[in-house]
Image (cartoon, grey):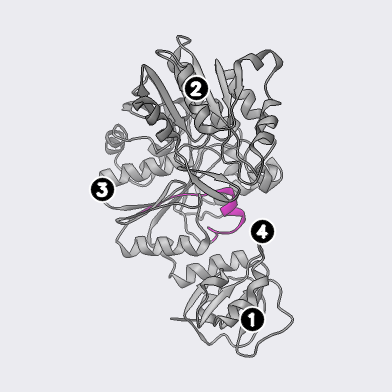
Amino acid sequence: MKTIKDLLFGCRILQVVGSTDGQVAGVHYDSREIKEGFLFVAIPGTQVDGHDFIEKAISLGARAVVCEQLPQALHERVTYIQTKDSAFALSAIAAHWYNHPSQQLKVVGVTGTNGKTSIATLLYQLFTSAQGACAGLLSTIKVVVGSEEQEATHTTPDALSIQKHLRTMVDAGLDYCFMEVSSHALVQHRVSHVHFDLAIFTNISRDHLDYHGDMNSYIKAKKMLFDQLDEGAVALTNDDHKHGSSMVADTKAKVRTYALKFPADYKVKILERQLDGMLLTFNDKECWTRVLGTFNAYNLCAVYGAAVELGMEELDVLVGMSQLEPATGRFQTLTGNGIVAVVDYAHTPDALENVLQTLQELNEGAHQIITVVGAGGNRDQGKRPQMAEVAVRKSDKVILTSDNPRFEDPAVILAQMEEGVPVESKMRVLTIVDRAQAIRTALMLAQDGDFVLIAGKGHETYQDIQGTKHHFSDVEQVQQFFNS
């Protein structure tokens, strides 16, 4: 048990009404989770404002309320803490409540538009295979804490959940945590009180502009991770990317670089590409990997650099990297009927171009590349025609289809995608709203030796339609076709 006072350090308090000596039985930002003696943090959200639920939280037993605006009616038995930023306060309170677990782990954060899941997952695999059960993982795909594994609901969990997961990792005796850090999480202060020992920047391209508004705001959001690093941390940045140096311009951390094109602290070269892997060199030392694609060469170089910076012996890193498997739904290949189907999470123009470029390099113009792609509803509309343009430019045939339409009409989304198709390419493009039918059609059109890329959903096993998640797996659709 902690007192209210114990939890308030660093919360940017404007005023306190009531005593801070009372003990707190628990902390939450969701009024439905409040119990007797809890502290409730009211956070303004994009859809729901926690301030609207202060009275409900008090009726359920909250003894303290953290908020940005004090309610008009105050209860004598309740302590009110007004703060400049409730989300930032929650981050501090969560860290205090769980006794700052990130200071007892080596925490690695990965941010960027593409590559976060792959790098975090590959690092987790590498350290787990080399050192046993020593690491936890917080990723888009799953959360792994000790022997427990659960499906993830967000790229980066809320501040309270993050601290809880980290505390469980510490209590389980783990040494490392590898974590994806999204731009939303940074802006919403979910990781403001996580102590990162190493942070990795992958790349940045158009995404989430429905939330951030413009690219400058999106870039600034990513940079927040490096701005919060202390002098004992390492900032590992992609020096081939135009924003690689600006990400670390103001960091206090030791800066290290990785690259494929330009000189860097950690340099990767691609010597050979095959359908079952690539022969690479890392700082002139050869390594065969089962992971494919130029974009994955960058990811692997970040893994290599991070592992060395964390103290792993270079030879052990190279041996371990030769055994790594790609993350689920990241350039996942399935073969049947002489066809190679590739399921990938690519849901931005840049990611789609990277995957298709890899297929072109493997194909060498010998066979068709058929792409199935859509765009999510209630998200950045500006990238929809861009997605279609990339698919058409890099593929022989394209099928535009539904992704997660959410609360939008799929036909409207597809019409916006079609705007990116040049007139001279329209004969090579089909529009099929039903995703299952679109995948089957692509596989039926494919001939011996062809590649079929199914992009946008990757590891996801659902389609989000009108607020309901219906079971749907691109991988299962392909397997059913090959087995029929």
Residue behind mark 4: 47
Mark 1 or mark 2, earlier in chain = 1
Look at 37% across and 20% down and name the residue there: 275
> Mark 3 or mark 2: which comes first in sequence?
3
Q: What residue is pinned by disc 2? A: 442
Q: How crowded is mark 1: few (under 14 residues within 10 Å), some or many (20 or more)?
A: many
Residue 185 lies in the magenta stretch: yes
- Residue for point 25% across, 49% down: 132
Image quadrant in which the C terminus is located? top left
Q: In this view, does 406 lie to the left or right of 423?
A: left
Q: What stretch is highlighted in magenta?
A: 176-192
Q: Is residue 403 visible?
A: yes
Is residue 383 visible in this depiction of the protein? no
Please name the residue that numbered disc 1 is placed on. 80
Q: Disc 3 versus disc 2: distance between alpha carbons? A: 43 Å
x, y (%) of residue 277? 35, 24
Under circle 1, the secondary element is strand
Q: Which amino acid, by three-letter code, is at mark 4?
A: Gln
Mark 3 residue element:
helix
x and y, in percent, of residue 399 in the image: 57, 24
Would residue 272 appear left or right of 33 to someone viewing this image? left
Sequence-wise first label, 4 or 3: 4
Hey, what amino acid is under mark 2? Answer: Ala
